[in-house]
Amino acid sequence: MRFIQNQLLKKETLANARKLLEGKWLQDSTKLPLLFEEIIKPHNRVCLEGDNQKQAVYLAKGLCKVNPQIVNNLHIVQSCLSLPEHVEVFERGIASKVDFCYSSGQGARVMNLAAEGKIEMKGIHTYLELFSRYFLDLTPNVALLVAEKADRAGNLYTGANTEETPAIAEATAFKDGIVIVEVNEIVDELPRVDIPASWVDVLVHSPTPQMVKPLFTRDPAKIDEVKILMAMMAIKGIYAKYGVNRLNHGIGYATSAVELLLPTYAESLGLKGKICQYMVINPCPTLIPAIESGFIKTICSPGGEVGMNEYVRAHADIFFNGSDGSQRSNRAFAQLAGLYAIDMFVGGSLQIDLMGNSSTATIERMTGFGGAPNLGSDINARRHSSDTWLKAGAEYAQTQDKTLLKGRKLVVQMVETFQAAGQPTFVEELDAITLQKKMKMPLPPIMIFGDDVTHIVTEIGIANLLLCKDLAEREQAIRAVAGYTPVGLAKNPQKVAELHKRGAIQYPEDLGIRFSDATRDLLAAKSIKDLVEISGGLYNPPSMYRDW
Amino acid sequence: MRFIQNQLLKKETLANARKLLEGKWLQDSTKLPLLFEEIIKPHNRVCLEGDNQKQAVYLAKGLCKVNPQIVNNLHIVQSCLSLPEHVEVFERGIASKVDFCYSSGQGARVMNLAAEGKIEMKGIHTYLELFSRYFLDLTPNVALLVAEKADRAGNLYTGANTEETPAIAEATAFKDGIVIVEVNEIVDELPRVDIPASWVDVLVHSPTPQMVKPLFTRDPAKIDEVKILMAMMAIKGIYAKYGVNRLNHGIGYATSAVELLLPTYAESLGLKGKICQYMVINPCPTLIPAIESGFIKTICSPGGEVGMNEYVRAHADIFFNGSDGSQRSNRAFAQLAGLYAIDMFVGGSLQIDLMGNSSTATIERMTGFGGAPNLGSDINARRHSSDTWLKAGAEYAQTQDKTLLKGRKLVVQMVETFQAAGQPTFVEELDAITLQKKMKMPLPPIMIFGDDVTHIVTEIGIANLLLCKDLAEREQAIRAVAGYTPVGLAKNPQKVAELHKRGAIQYPEDLGIRFSDATRDLLAAKSIKDLVEISGGLYNPPSMYRDW
């Protein structure tokens, strides 16, 4: 296998495919499966671009049509298994092995195939982890990518949803792999070049544009008073306390509530210019009021969001846009900024155990975690300081009676005590443990480790785990904010009172917040329509979000 | 400041500079300072490309010539302060603030300027950390970069030493910053495009080619028997024990010794195909014998190495090369692979304390750490498994009586007990602590934290810190391998005997290695000349390394 990727083999392979091509372009699109049969060898590592938001749909359909006698045993290395075709390649015997991050929508099917032995699941990764392995031991032999436009020479424009395309293309092209790209539009001159033609070997004209789903749109109408209460506590008790200026928000309603309280509640506390100036986050529509009010200075996006392109274009001072004015997202660099450059991650989870370990894996569904473990981990390798990071580190060092050697990233979980009636968020044991046994995995699929978590916010209050001396105290602090769940009811009232006295637990009243203050009037936008208005008509929500 | 980077300002600035340009090219190179005075505004963040190996020398000289009345208070954001000009901009009052990684050669001058208040040193970073901040809160307003060649349109070829140029260019270009590039050669057609012209605003023809220093060349003639003994212990006691296949080596002689023992000693132990197949490392000449013998499958390089270009070109199956056949290095992705995709880091240090904390900072010199903290840190966010990682994790979990929730990256320090006569490597307190007080830094400049280190190898033996139950045991394990240093002499013999019995300390005889076996005959190459021969004449060492 040593020379499988070398230049001679690449040249020979492309020479064999040349009869189907005109320059770099596939002449007859019905010959796509034939092209794949010429280019893709059995046991090849193949990245069939499946990003969080966009996928190489046309190439995926084409790959499903190859003859499994010719193309088989592929080792798929890609972020997301989200299209039916991503699973079909295994069902049809074209592929047999996978290294991936996330199986949105296909979780159950993937698990069944794994249980039947039709997929050898080598590993579940965070995004950045998989990208990094593209440059070491999982370099694709063939990358099947998607771009919006190409010029005739094959330069690519990947547009607002650039996401992962450049990282995959670079790893593949510079290790003599073969880069095949589907594009919907062929133009004489590109608005900008995202990937140079010399990284691209074959181009295929796809009749359909990329389909992008509105994954990051949260309707303000769905934000209730409990979420608003939690957001108020978080803003006053965490964002303001630590002066958090560089952060990432997860995609739940709790963080949307925070975003919509910035120009109202947070501004009334005098926090403008003091918190939330630099964010690693997709262009979520609920950010619009905070952007308009001048709260946010810079947004580094891993991807795009449906309907936000014109708004982003008009805010080149905030977003990373190209010379053509449109957004350039890059998941590799945004996840990197989310690991190394932020002082706080705020996310949610389906389950949290007594040590603070959390997971979104349930017994029915093992989807993977995307970027959460990366964004929500403290990193021992960070060496630059910020006041926020030092303050969190000092709190922890003091609790542990240790000399301050490093700061801490704030890792906050904002969850309600119950996910639904009878479904407590706080549990004695994560479903991940059962799932590990069932799937015979070497490790339980934990999303964020308890030792990385610094704060848990529920409707009951804030548990500050930095102020807990040991695991027994951490357990009591978690029970204290777990409300009427069995975990919460089993708390030790005396120990909890002691932790409360020390500030390791804070209730709304400790922060001067009354439940009656938490009204929807505080939301800077109460509906999608409000967001459109505040955006000056630049936000163009997908029709499913329009009821007017 | 909110709109300082926006598109209008960029257009206006470039319009003012247009009188000096023909297309994107500076017409008269004597006008370079004038060009800077038109483009660079006071308080701008400027990246004056200073990579580990290459620097934008011509632009640096030009920047030193601007009028400080016009261009001043710049905030320099760049990896390395290595040229005299990198310090001169502060002495001349052109710049006043710096965020950087490493001050190779200029350490003392930088420290003095900081002490005099002429440099506001905001933070010392690891490489990846600074790159990540380019995408969040330290985006350059102006980037002054270097490339080998450009075509007339301004597409760039950065060549074998691509290093950091694409990451800086991307962050700057996509936030409406201005990208100015010096190139030594202007050609009609580039061998390959590393950076598209649409990311570049201004080009300057530099009369001199890039100067690259042979930072990664270690002469086998200087490897003595002590290093060979340590290398044998490491290979048998760590590489073979854990089956380490994905790793990074630091640049000391100890790891060079390991590299030169792979085709001899390691092969005699039957380890070919079992260890060292995937490496994140510069193309170090001492890797040649291991590559030739088929030990190494893939090398992901952060940069290049002088004299290795033709050798790398001939080994496209091993290295990441472009379609033109020459190397494409990329520090951002290589450091990422070094964080997330490797199972082991092996490095050295000037000092190690009783907890295993290490630092290369001394009282006279504060240089920064480059990539070591990143490569040599365990990362809580990793989610994919490997046998090596699980084995290390299981050892630790068992010692701590904990359930296995995650693996461990092996972080190995290979050091002799003394750096020089009277200069012990093992110390009660790191100089970093004194330096912290002297420089009034918030944290001591520790390179790698003790809690990340898993093994320390000296000429005395191997301390396996994964098998130490607590800090007291860790201290004794470290003292046990510290030899005749004061730290070593103060060991508790009874406790050490107990740790030895448990395998937490291993002496050469425990591994079946006799000191008399450690001879230079084991080295696959004994001189630079040997390396040239083994490379088939493809390695072309710089003249300073030629004595024949």
Image (tube, coloured by chain):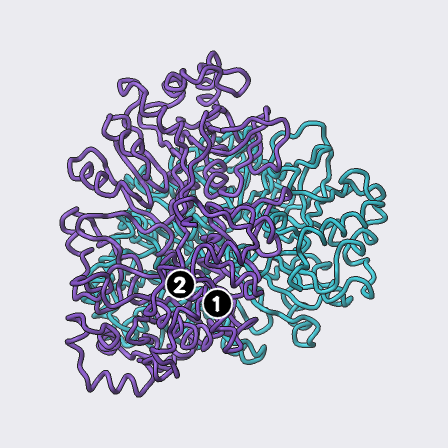
Chain colours: A cyan, B purple
Picture coordinates of residue B518, whole percent (x, y): 37, 74
Query: Please, what secondary structure does the residue beneath circle 1 have?
Result: strand
Name the residue nearer the viewer: B461 or A460.
B461
Q: Are marks 1 and 2 on the same chain?
A: no
In the displayed orientation, state which residue is furthest to the top. B19
Q: Chain of mark 2?
A: B
- Specify the amino acid type for callout 1: Ser
| Relative height, residue A517 to residue B54 (above, below) | below
Q: Nearer the viewer, residue B72 or B264?
A: B264
Foreground residue, A488 or A152?
A: A152
> Residue A396, how many percent across, how many down?
25, 62
Q: Which residue is mark 2?
A: B255
**Mark 2 Cα-neighbour bin, 10 Å: few <14, some 14–19, many ≥20:** many
The answer to whether residue A419 of the structure is visible from this angle is: no
Q: CA distance from mark 1 to mark 2?
A: 40 Å
Residue A315 coordinates in the image, percent (x, y): 49, 31
* Quarter holding residue B193: top right
Q: Is residue B465 left or right of residue A209?
A: left
Which image quarter is the C terminus of chain A in? top right
Residue found 60% across the figure and 53% down from its top: B315
Q: Is residue B420 left or right of residue A139?
A: left
Q: Which mark is residue A359?
A: 1
Query: Against A464, is B184 above or below?
Result: above
B264 with respect to A500 (left or right): right
User: To which chain does the residue with label 1 belong?
Assistant: A
Looking at the rendered structure, the kind of residue marked 2 is Thr
